[in-house]
DNA sequence: GTCCAGTAGC
DNA sequence: GCTACTGGAC
């Protein structure tokens, strides 16, 4: 195969991709980045998994947080790590016991998968969770969101995340049209292009906190919001 | 009672 | 694109 197969093609405009590219007004990206990071410094939550970059701890917290709220996760996060302080110790434990320890967080497929991730990490990766997206996605129980969370929170990479908080925030601020959930391709791309180089960790944490505490699903706190000068949804109308 | 969650599997 | 999973918020 020739390496020059494209040499005669005329320069193409970027292919039209109806939902996969969001136009950003001049300066909007930088303003959003700066304001979000500043807001986070002042108002970010102090959560236990933000005091560590141990990939195992981050993994446990993210799997717990997949469908469970922060307040219910915090005590169980401590208990779980006390009982299973490392991939090795989790891998060595019987699944039935791990599921008991998990109780009452629910969605009990999660502790099974967490256990299997621990076994595989020990068996195939020498007890070190890989930082590669493809490899992370190959584990059952790690999807695109959790892979991004691990890469940014444990390995400090500028990897994008997209959960329902982030979908809501980015859709409101930058798009404000159509159904948020039908625009995931565009929103993933946005989540990626918005990350300030080298600041994936803080930026992603900030996005999550902002969605959880200001740009909330119901009755967002628009009056406190630093994005209101350029938010496409401001002023939010709850009656819509 | 209704809605909402990330992932896997369809 | 839809659904099961399980429990909480409202």
Image (cartoon, coloured by chain):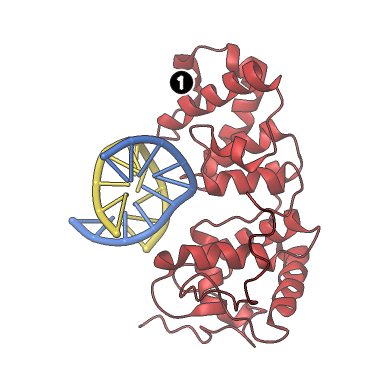
Chain colours: A red, B blue, C yellow
**Residue A43 horizontal/vertical position (percent):** 71, 64
Q: Which residue lies at the image location 53% right of the left edge and 44% below the top edge?
A: A65
Q: Tally the marks.
A: 1
Q: Residue furthest right?
A: A198
Can residue A114 be spotted in the picture? yes
The quadrant where residue A31 appears? bottom right
**Residue A26 horizontal/vertical position (percent):** 70, 87
Question: On screen, A130 above or below A168?
Answer: above
Question: On screen, A224 above or below A85?
Answer: below
**The C terminus of chain A - image quarter:** bottom left
- Check disc 1 and report the residue beneath it: A100
Question: On screen, C2 above or below C7?
Answer: below
| Chain letter, disc 1 residue | A
Q: Secondary structure at mark 1?
A: helix
Crowdedness of circle 1 by 10 Å Cα count: few (<14), some, many (20+)? few
The quadrant where residue A58 appears? top right
**Residue A218 horizontal/vertical position (percent):** 44, 70
- A41 or A172, which lies in front? A172
């Amino acid at each position: 195969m020739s390496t020059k197969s494209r040499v005669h093609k005329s320069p193409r405009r970027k292919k039209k991709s109806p939902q996969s590219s969001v136009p950003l007004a001049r300066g909007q990206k930088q303003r959003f980045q700066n304001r979000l990071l500043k807001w986070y410094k002042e108002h970010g939550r102090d959560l236990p998994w933000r005091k560590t970059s141990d990939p195992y701890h981050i993994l446990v917290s993210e799997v717990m947080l997949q469908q469970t709220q922060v307040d219910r996760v915090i005590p169980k996060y401590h208990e779980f790590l006390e009982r299973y302080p490392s991939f090795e110790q989790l891998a060595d434990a019987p699944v039935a016991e791990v599921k008991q320890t998990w109780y009452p967080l629910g969605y009990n497929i999660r502790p099974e998968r967490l256990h299997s991730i621990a076994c595989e990490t020990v068996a195939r990766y020498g007890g070190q969770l890989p930082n590669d997206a493809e490899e992370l996605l190959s584990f059952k129980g790690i999807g695109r969101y959790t892979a991004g969370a691990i890469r940014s929170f444990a390995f400090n990479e500028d990897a994008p995340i997209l959960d329902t908080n982030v979908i809501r925030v980015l859709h409101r601020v930058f798009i404000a049209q159509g159904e948020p959930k039908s625009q995931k391709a565009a929103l993933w791309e946005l989540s990626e292009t918005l990350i300030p180089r080298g600041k994936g960790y803080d930026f992603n944490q900030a996005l999550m906190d902002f969605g959880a505490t200001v740009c909330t699903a119901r009755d967002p706190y628009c009056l406190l919001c630093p994005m209101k000068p350029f938010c496409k949804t401001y002023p939010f109308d709850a009656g819509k």
